Image (cartoon, rainbow, N blue to C red):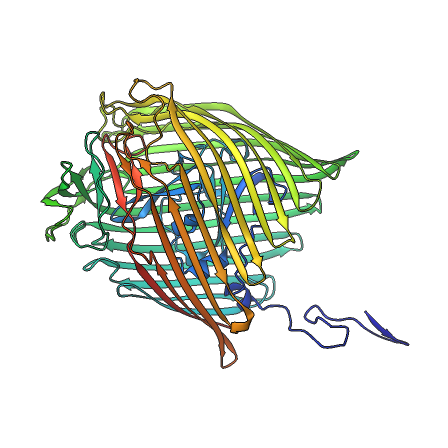
Amino acid sequence: MLTAGSFSYKATAAERLHVKGVIKSPAPTPAEQISGIKADYLNKKANFGPLGDLDLQKAPFSVMQTSHDVVENQQLRTVDQMVGFMPSVQVQARGDNPVFTGIVNRGFTADKFSNSRIDGLNASFSTPLATEEVDSLTVLNGISGAIYGPESPAGMVEVALKRPTDKPFFNFNFGYDSNASPLESLDTSLGKGPIKIRFNYMNQTGQMYVKGSNQWRNAYSGDIDIQLAKHTKLELDGSQYNMSYSGLPGIFAYGANIALPPAPSAAVPGYGQSQGGVNASTALGVMKLKHDFSPNLHLTLGGLYQSSPSYNHSITNTILNNQGDYNQTVTAIPIGREFSIWSNTAYLNSTLRTGFIRHNLNIGTNGYTADMDSPTQFQSFDIGTASLENPQIVPGPQPKFSGSYHQSTTQQQSFLFGDYMDLGKYVSVMGQFSWGWINLENYNKQHQITSQSHAYGDFSPSVAATFHPTKSFSAYFNWGKSIGAGSQASAGSLNAGETLPIYHSEQYEGGIKYLYRNRINFNLDGFTMTRPYAFTDPISKIYGYNGLQRDSGIEFQTSGSLTPEISILGGVTWLHPFLEHASAPNYEGKEIAGVPEWASNFLLDYHPKILHGMAFNGNIHYVGQRAANVYDTSWAAQYVTLDLGARFTTKVCDKNVTFRFEVDNVTQENYWSSLTPSASPGSGASNSAALGLPRTWHLTASLYF
């Protein structure tokens, strides 16, 4: 407020006055905010379902986020790429099928539905989502069954969809990916009153990194915010994502007595064929109703529907010997051709005081029903033999599906209750509890139940305490248990189709967090976790709980700005995953197959003001050696990849324009990106490995106004 006699003036929100009266630039527009050029990588807040939004500095959990700015500046194309910046998380690729992926967190494999959510509702992360419809991704590391209900101890992946902005904007993008794959997309927000709309469109087609390969992708998404009343808001989201890939390298399968060879280059034709690939689509609909009864009492209701049909013609290269010879086949995958999921949430949150204690109470329920259908008949063709040094291109027919039957139904519902208490200024205590009901049934082609698994109100508790003497420092401890649905024995095991019983997992975790000058945080934590370990015994060929997996580790994470001109996102994870109480002596004490002991990732973005819109970024990703079978007799070598990029922001006709160029895997490292041993849920009796991406490049021009 400025005063001179009877004259007074109050600066508007858009104005910032110096003492000398010079007006600074107005607050950034929505177009400037969504461009990502600020490189704001600081992890600040996250939504934890029934707990609501929590300040990560005080939250008694290990959490990492990939923000919208990272997606923009690194030119990420699919959501699974967003977890690549998190060293505690690995993606299980499926070779020539880049659409359906699995998640491994702290050495534990995630469940298809229980460990992933879209806007707080259960959904499948293994099905494709385009980054054009997503704002950010958050991963809660470790056990979270007391917060969300029954799940694997592989953490929780939370995908946040884009929302309409307060003011309208338009963003057009024109991109080009190697080798010859142009892309165009649109992101816009419309409306200023009680109804606002966000719309996204994307289309991409062309050859990928292998000569003769092809991709086609398009996506449409709409997000609507309707202010029904002053304290009532309705959020609606709908999207359709279609994609087709062919000609990419297939998976490499190998037996227990075959050593995994050094990885060849994924850019060499012949490890996949044009008749191999996948056609898939994902339809998504989300509804959330939010109502504030008072400033201290809030209700959230939500529902989600997701459907994903696919036609998967998988190339498998079965390694025959230690000289690198392999036999190649193409198969119309007979399992899980189409699935759908309905999920629900209902949370009531209240804040109140009893003496010096501030309570943040929550009560609610969430759950889902997931159905999976498979074909009754399928084809598989033998392509022939070749060697890793001399792969062959062999044209041929594409295998077909026919018929359909209902393969499985999974129903899960949880009742949740908890209290996050502030005991004065410096101590917070949390108690969170869930009771879970599970009904899992598998069927044969005659519609008969072949196996089933049930839980009736099984209990998952979690307690935590945080000491935060200052706003910049906190120390925490948490303990929790969780139940999880047993996995299904897959093809290749003698008990294929059988569902294992409900299992229990447990976690102890402690850590410290430091926020420096409100611009960069440093987190350090240690943990130990256990769960029954299910795999197909290479000797008996029986899939079952054949030991106890115990993972102990240390995580270091950082995000934010090292200086006003250097942003950082990354961390290091040391993990000791091993098997104890094994069913056979030759498994006892072995490292868990497919999981690295060391992993790290650091992304740096350098945007000096002196260069007037020019910026540079570099990302280095390291994964240590991994056991390639349950005996630890074969190993995948460690690898390092380096990504380098640059961007330039300027104005054309008074509109912001940003040019971005990125080269991934600059050094052309050949590596196995993921291993799926026989110990992994969903794998067969043999091990498999997928090749990592070769050197690729991306170019994008973006117009914002």
Q: Nearer the viewer, residue 441 or 176?
A: 176
Residue 6: in sight, yes or no? yes
Asked whether, in this view, residue 696 is left or right of residue 302, the answer is left
Percent coordinates x, y for residue 637 in the rendering? 30, 41
Question: Residue 275 in the image: x percent, y percent?
Answer: 16, 51
Indicate the position of residue 609 as horizontal and vertical percent values: 55, 70
- Viewer-proximal residue, 661 or 361? 661
Residue 434 visible from this viewpoint? no
Q: Out of 295 and 61, give the one closest to the viewer.
A: 61
Q: Is residue 427 above or below residue 27?
A: above
- Image quadrant in which you'd find residue 600: top left
Residue located 60% across and 39% down the image: 512
Q: Quadrant of residue 48?
A: top right
- The correct choice, above or below, for 295 with respect to 133 in the image is above
Q: Where is the N terminus found, in terms of image quarters? A: bottom right
Q: Where does residue 182 sit, x and y in percent of width and height? A: 31, 67
Q: Quadrant of residue 166?
A: bottom right
Give left or right: position of 384 versus 595: left
> Compared to 95, does 169 lie above or below?
below
* Label tally: 0
From the viewer's perspective, is 79 left or right of 337? Answer: right
Could you tell me which residue is drawn at 36 percent across and 42 percent down?
340
Q: Is residue 28 left or right of residue 80?
A: right
